[in-house]
Image (cartoon, rainbow, N blue to C red):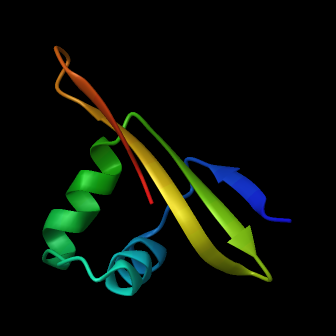
Amino acid sequence: MPEYRENELCYEDYRALRTLAGWENHSEEQTRRALAAALYDVTAVEDGRAVAMGRLVGTGCTTLLRTW
């Protein structure tokens, strides 16, 4: 059963999960800025390894929850 960690999503886990999903990765600078700007994030961890994540991002007018 996974452990859920709130607001601890790190660059390395984010990049690894995007790679596993077959999604494009952005530059480290862009990614770190985006992670710092997230309203909320949650990471599912099993055996010390991130296996899923979700992020809540918004502009102040619109909010989007992304999960994978």
Q: Is residue 35 left or right of residue 61?
A: right
The percent coordinates of residue 10 (x first, y second) are: 47, 68
At x 20%, y 78%, the residue is 25
Q: Where in the figure is residue 62, as x and y percent of width and height?
A: 19, 20
Left or right position of 28 against 49: left
Which residue ends up furthest to the right in the rendered image? 1
Q: Judge left or right: residue 48 versus residue 65.
A: right
Q: Residue at x 20, y 17 (%)?
A: 60
**The C terminus: image quadrant:** bottom left
Q: Quadrant of residue 31?
A: bottom left
Q: Residue furthest top?
A: 61
User: Residue 39 appears in which quarter of the rendering?
Assistant: top left
On the image, the x and y values in percent for residue 57 come to 30, 37
40, above or below 32, in the image: above
For residue 18, side relative to residue 51 (left or right): left
Q: Position of residue 33 (x, y in %)?
A: 22, 56
Q: Residue at x 28, y 42 (%)?
A: 37
- Count how many numbered circles sit on residues in the image: 0
Residue occupying the point 33% across, 50% down: 36
- Quadrant that contains the N terminus: bottom right
